[in-house]
Image (cartoon, grey):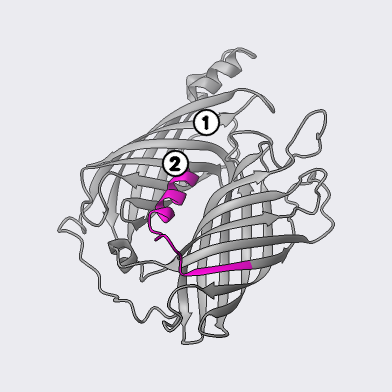
């Protein structure tokens, strides 16, 4: 769901023809983050192709100072093809210029999308692959990039990139792959080459939010989480949560939230009680306090949440919870803040360890 929303957001912004096409090669290293991680003894390699454009004069683009948006398709080696295999991904990307001159630019960006991993865990045929439990995964990218114009149409770039692959623990094992890389690439401009890569030609003016932008407003959210328990290829169990909180617009493109959440693993409670002695319902309930940030793109928002659990509970691996995801609202944030119906998709984690995938339905009063 989260990958679909982000990809849809980018696709609706693209014209029939992009401004830039290009390719890149990456040299990196696959990080072994577990004592029983499969053998990693060689560098990784990747190749990618992409299309990109400078975002237009829509309201979200004006407020974000016209970042570059694009689509990337890539192949990634893992340095252990027999056990982990190779990865292929398609990701929607966005990057923000940090420093711009007529001939060069330094930018910060990232991406999120869908990935296919060729080898997964199998108790008989591939028991040492504790990294990936499903062929279909999410991929998240973070990169710093330096572009240099060679001609009116051709640019070269070098980038530091970090790639993470995970299935949100919908299937286990799910330690995930983490691959930092040094990338080299080029871009070829297919529209008007006489326009410099700087954003100086775009208007930086923005429209103000309505009169409720600086007030607190309450919200309520209901969530359904899914994760696999009971060992590999075990059942996928749901959990249910309710969240109450307040939100406040902080800038033209960002919003902060403060909330209290109650989560109940009813299905896990039933599963465990079928195997062992009776347990308390409270052992499978969680109370938490959460602080969130929403980076707004009109109807869409990129959401990061940090929280702390207030009670002990079964299978707790950390007192810290984190969430990352996307949410969609019925009305554009830049037209209406209150009385919004929202739909979200999040990866929930214990600190940095993915725990479950959540779908959320909410109402902002």
Quickly name the residue at label 1: 226
Q: Position of residue 32 (x, y in %)?
A: 75, 52
* Mark 1 or mark 2: whose residue is earlier in sequence: 1
- At x 64%, y 67%, the residue is 24
Q: Is residue 20 magenta?
A: yes
CB under 8 Å between discs 1 and 2: no
Residue 264 shows in this picture: no
- At x 54%, y 54%, the residue is 91
Label 1 to label 2, Cα distance in Å? 11 Å
- Badge 2: residue crowd in 10 Å (few <14, some 14–19, many ≥20): many
Q: Which residues are magenta?
A: 1-23
Whether 16 is drawn above or below 236: the answer is below
Q: Position of residue 171 (x, y in %)?
A: 63, 33
Quickly name the residue at label 2: 345
Residue 185 shows in this picture: yes
- At x 57%, y 79%, the residue is 155
What quarter of the picture does the C terminus occupy? top left
Q: Is residue 304 magenta?
A: no
Q: Position of residue 274 (x, y in %)?
A: 60, 12
- Helix or strand or loop: what does disc 1 sit on? strand
Side of 11 where 134 appears, left or right? right
The residue lying toward the viewer, choosing from 352 and 307, is: 352
- At x 25%, y 74%, the residue is 205
How many callouts does the rendering have?
2
Instruction: Name the residue furthest left.
Output: 211
- Helix or strand or loop: what does disc 2 sit on? strand
């Amino acid at each position: 769901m989260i990958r679909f929303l982000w990809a849809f957001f980018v696709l609706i912004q693209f014209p029939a023809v992009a401004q830039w096409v290009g390719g890149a090669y990456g040299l990196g290293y696959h990080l072994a983050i577990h004592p029983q991680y499969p053998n990693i003894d060689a560098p990784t390699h990747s190749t990618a192709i992409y299309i990109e454009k400078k975002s237009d004069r829509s309201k979200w683009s004006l407020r974000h100072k016209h970042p570059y948006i694009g689509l990337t398709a890539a192949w990634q080696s893992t340095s252990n093809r027999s056990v982990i295999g190779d990865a292929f991904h398609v990701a929607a990307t966005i990057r923000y210029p940090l420093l711009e001159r007529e001939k060069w630019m330094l930018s910060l960006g990232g991406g999120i999308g869908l990935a296919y991993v060729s080898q997964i865990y199998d108790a008989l045929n591939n028991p040492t692959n504790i990294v990936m439990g499903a062929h279909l995964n999410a991929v998240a990218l973070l990169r710093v990039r330096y572009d240099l114009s060679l001609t009116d149409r051709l640019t070269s770039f070098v980038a530091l990139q970090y790639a993470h692959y995970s299935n949100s623990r919908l299937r286990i094992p799910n330690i995930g792959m983490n691959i930092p890389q040094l990338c080299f690439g080029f871009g070829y401009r297919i529209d008007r080459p006489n326009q410099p890569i700087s954003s100086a030609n775009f208007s930086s003016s923005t429209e103000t939010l309505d009169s409720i932008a600086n007030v607190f407003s309450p919200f309520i959210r209901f969530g359904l989480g899914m994760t696999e328990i009971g060992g590999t290829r075990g059942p996928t169990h749901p959990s249910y949560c309710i969240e109450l909180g307040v939100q406040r617009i902080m800038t033209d493109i960002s919003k902060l939230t403060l909330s209290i959440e109650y989560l109940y693993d009813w299905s896990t409670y039933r599963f465990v009680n079928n195997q062992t002695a009776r347990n308390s319902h409270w052992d499978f309930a969680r109370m938490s306090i959460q602080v969130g940030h929403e980076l707004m793109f009109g109807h869409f928002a990129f959401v990061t949440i940090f929280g702390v659990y207030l009670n002990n509970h079964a299978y707790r691996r950390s007192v810290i919870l984190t969430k990352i995801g996307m949410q969609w609202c019925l009305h554009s944030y830049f037209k209406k803040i209150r009385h919004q119906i929202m739909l979200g998709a999040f990866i929930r984690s214990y600190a940095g360890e993915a725990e479950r995938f959540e779908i959320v339905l909410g109402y902002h009063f």
